[in-house]
Image (cartoon, rainbow, N blue to C red):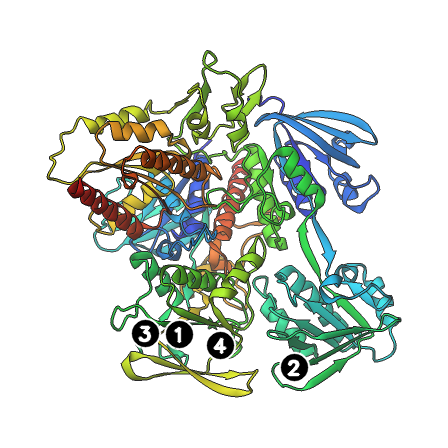
Amino acid sequence: MKSSNVLVIGGGIAGLTAAYELAKLDINVELVEKTPFLGGHAARFTCKATECCEKCGACMVEEKIQKVSQNKNIKIHTNATLNTISRNDRFYFNIHINGQNKETDVSVSKENDISISADAVIMATGFTPYYPAKKPYGYKVFDNVITNLELEEMLRNNNIAVKPSDKQAPDKIAFIQCVGSRDSKLNHLWCSKICCASALRMARLIKRRQPETSITIFYIDIQGFGNDFENFYEKAKKDIKLIRAIPADIYKVENERLKLEYFDHLLMQPIEEVYDMVVLSVAITPKNESKELADSLGIETYDTGFIKSCNKDDTATSNGVFVAGTAGGPLSISESAAQGAKTAWDVKKYLNKNQLEF
Amino acid sequence: MNFLNKIIMIIGSSVCALNIAKELLSEDKEIIIVSKEKETSASIGAFKALSIKPDRILSGTEIISCNGTLGNFKVLMAKNGEFISKEVSDIIIAEDYERVHNYFHYDIKASENILPLSSLAGSDSYIKSTVESLPAGGKIAFLTGIGYESNPLIAEEIMLACLKLQTEFNRQTYILANNLKVSGNELEKLYRETKKSGTIYFKFTETVPEVKQNKDGQITFEFKDEITHHNFRISPALTIIDETISASEYTKKLAAIFKLHTATEGFLQTENVHRKVVYTNRKGILAAGPSRAVLNNTEIKIDSVNAAALAVGAKYDNKNDQAGTAEINTGSCIRCLTCYRCCPYLAIALETRPVVMSDSCEGCGICFAECPRGAISLKFPDNRNIPDQIKQYADIQYEKTSSPLIIAFCCSRSASRAKELALSMGHNLPLNLKVVEVPCSGIISIEFILSAFLNNAEGVLVLTCHKGNCHSEDGNIFAANRVEQLKEMFENMNLKKERLEIKTLASNMGYEFAQIVNNFENTIKTLRQSS
């Protein structure tokens, strides 16, 4: 039996899981990652454990990266962009390695342009965080307005939340949910799924490490559910102020502080409140490059721009291109991993079927 | 392992169980279905339509007990008062949910014009006759998630029903809710469609609607809308109450029979982040779909494939690569059964004496550290042994003036990875910090800690996963109890208990790792000066 080669595009949690599961089935994998690092967005997330593990899954990434890096069946190409991809019975693709590769791992290729062929392709290209500059929240204008992803990274690297303006701990933090999600003006008719639980967890983490901080979350509907969410939510409500309203504007006031304006439905009047730092929970949005890639590989996309995943029962109808992870829509870390594993098995079935036909 | 006789048992007849069966059959695997459902039920009928031998579909059958290990489970069942025994290689539990209506949340009593949500999921003709029996122009209200949290499955059912009632039956619908769960499955779009079709939403954040029910069971809602501040009174011709989806009583029973860890709601698994989603604490026993969590159809499909893949041949790789396997020295064992009681993986079988079933052993070392007779050893694949590793540091001559020798026992899944991350982040670590990497903190015995001190360590750190994050579920708790015990002993003996510390970490906490070890070094340095 000839050994199969599978191209995995994207080294985030879905791509890493798919690559690792394929490798375990003795299938060779070419893992192509655009950035210099594996792990994707989740590799920059913080552990959100307070009195106990909150099951966010962010710690899984380190383990996954280690397993993938050590596996001989996986060839990792970081800093790599896909130049061309074509199909003629098999898939032929050309990748360009940008700059000098810092990784010392022997499996990392050093050449600048590489041509490889594959029997199947997994698109695990991930998402683009919504860039909130068009929202009236002063992102990139006011120092102390950051995104939830930037807060994740801050907590991971420094343990505590600090204001970007002066590196001091903020007294009052506001989270604004659904920035770019559930937004008909942007035609973003989806909920990004992970931000409510993530904001609540980060808020509780900050409260634990910086108990003096007062935290408010502005929201539309709190989306968490399932295993023990109710208990968690009750605990969160005790520590955190939850306001069901989405602020209209943010203005800068003295000392780089931020004035939020929102409509209080109970009082039937607009309220102004000053915070030291504002965290925007930005949407998970489809990547533009993913759509182009999907088009060139003959894969359909939803109206939303996310890619239709191949969840068909019969893999024989598949054309050899598979989709995993947030390229297909918002998912949590463990959901991305589950989908990555499932996709690996779908690919294996597809390869078996194809080999029988040869 | 006996691969010749590989029959895979599926417990349950849910949609998920059916998907798994199809998946396994397409791989030419022999399967056996065990379900409590009646022979004549629709769900059993779906299995009959597949190419499964009739005697391999055990309907009306309940699991009684299970013995054995991966590759060789012996399952005892009961059908019509008779016992049946089967030998199978793997077991996949895919039991359906239980749905309980939430009448009590709203203090509503059952009556003609009140229905639980699942009754609308029935046939179209039932919905038609139900709606047509309502008085002309009669309105329909849905109550969901007020005073408790619902989920997207329920939200989807309600919104689909509203869309149908509005567009096909021209009925005015209301949804009275708190948090409307629209995460996933294009539910936001559906939400917009229902609004467009005329469904009116009332959201209750700070208030709750007053529910009045008269003698005939007729319900009236009275409330002041939180947004418009207008008073409303709605007397719907039909009120639909949502349901709570939870693990069935039988699933909970199965957890007890198979000794599986469960979440608070009784679902199999504890959402342990170190495990693949369908894994349980027992190798060879998988929990898929509705038996492990509230999942939508796509997620159930993913679970089906993942469970089938594991049972068919994707390797159970959960074991830490460098973890060992426990072995019981029969000469020293006094059959106290401590190992049997503390093994989270049920890898100890009770024969004439306790025996380790090596296929199920994950090498966490809890039994090794807990055995009062020291009768258990761990064989590591690389012949490594922890006592030697501790000793090797004693041979190095440490200048009294330089940094003190600190031995840190680090769990390979969390603290060891955090140490690497700390270094790659550019943090400075104490000069003489020596790490003893362990497969799970459950292995860190009192003897290991004392041995570290005996071998010249001035301070010992035990670095474990966070509570609820241990791959072995409570290896970290065992470690914490031992440290607690030692600290108490140190205090009684007038030794500085500050020389021993336990902290919890995750693999992505590089900063925290650096802080913990550097602070600890400072503590030890201070102790040195004061002594």
Q: Which residue is mark 1?
A: A132
Q: Give the distance between the C-alpha atoms of the residues marked 4 and 3, in whole angstroms.
A: 25 Å
Q: Secondary structure at mark 3?
A: loop
In the image, B401: left or right of A186?
left
- Between disc 2 and disc 3, the foreground one is 2
**Circles 2 and 4: CB atoms closer than 8 Å:** no
Q: Give the distance between the C-alpha atoms of the residues marked 3 and 1, in whole angstroms.
A: 14 Å
- Mark 2 surroundings: few (<14), some (14-19) or many (≥20) residues within 10 A: some
Q: Which residue is mark 4?
A: A186
**Circles 4 and 3: CB atoms closer than 8 Å:** no
Amino acid at the residue labelled 1: Pro
Q: Mark 3 or 1 closer to N-term?
A: 1
- Mark 4 surroundings: few (<14), some (14-19) or many (≥20) residues within 10 A: few
In the image, B21: left or right of A274?
right
Position of residue B261 measured from the top left corner of the image (x, y, whole percent): 57, 40
- Between disc 3 and disc 1, the foreground one is 3
Q: Give the distance between the C-alpha atoms of the residues marked 2 and 3, in whole angstroms.
A: 36 Å
Q: Which residue is mark 3?
A: A144
Q: Residue at x 42, y 27 (%)?
A: B369
In front here: A340 or B86? Answer: B86
Image quadrant for the C terminus of chain B?
top left
Q: Residue at x 63, y 54 (%)?
A: B297
Q: Are marks 3 and 1 on the same chain?
A: yes
Q: Are marks 2 and 4 on the same chain?
A: no
Q: Which residue is mark 2?
A: B225
Q: Chain of mark 2?
A: B
Position of residue B517 measured from the top left corner of the image (x, y, whole percent): 26, 45
Q: Residue at x 67, y 38 (%)?
A: B254
